[in-house]
Image (cartoon, helix red, strand yellow):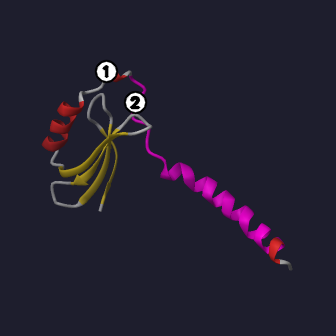
Amino acid sequence: MTLSRLLARVAAPAAVLVALAAPALADPTCTTAARDAWIPEDQMKAKIAELGFKDIRSFEVTKGNCYEIYGHDKDGRKAEVYFDPTDARIVKQEID
């Protein structure tokens, strides 16, 4: 078997696996509401602190219209959390 045939046999299944994995890695969609319906960022940061998240090193708006933070939870564990900006509901979180 030639090298090009071997690469073709490996590349096609690998491409399929990457395509299937992509949605799992995507950020969640939190809302379709207009920005004027969102909780202002300063108020949202206060709500996040009230929920016990601290040491926030990043606060962003995602493509899926979420407020996303990177920081720590109340127990000091690393946290990546996505919030719905209209009601401060946690949509997705990963705690290490």
Magenta extent? 5-33
Image vertical order of residue 35 relative to residue 67, above or below: above
Magenta stretch secondary structure, dominant: helix
- Label 1 CA crowd tier, 10 Å (few <14, some 14–19, many 20+): few
Answer with left or right where residue 80 lies relative to residue 53. Answer: right
87 on left or right of 75: right
Q: Amino acid at mark 2?
A: Thr
Whether residue 66 is situated above or below residue 15 in the rendered picture: above
Mark 2 / mark 1, whichever is N-terminal: 2
Q: Which residue is mark 1?
A: 37
- Residue tagged by mark 2? 31
Q: Is residue 20 magenta?
A: yes
Which residue is located at x 31 percent, y 48 percent?
A: 81
Residue 87, how many percent across, how many down?
27, 30
Dot 2 and dot 1 residues touching (CB under 8 Å)? yes
Quadrant position of residue 84: top left
Residue nearest the observer in this picture, 87 or 59 = 59
The CA span between labels 2 and 1 is 10 Å
The quadrant of the picture occupied by the N terminus is bottom right
Residue 80 in picture, x, y percent from top left: 31, 52
* Quarter of the rendering occupied by the C terminus: bottom left
At horizontal 15% and vertical 37% (from top left) the residue drawn is 46
Rendered residue at 15%/54% (across/down)? 74
Secondary structure beneath dot 2 equals loop
User: Which label was assigned to residue 53?
Assistant: none
Please tell me which residue is depicted at 85% across the width and 78% down the height of the picture: 2
Which class describes the residues within 10 Å of circle 2: few (<14), some (14-19), or many (20+)? some
What's the amino acid at mark 1?
A: Ala
Lateral position of residue 7 relative to residue 92, left or right? right
Q: Secondary structure at mark 1?
A: helix
Residue extending furthest toward the right: 1
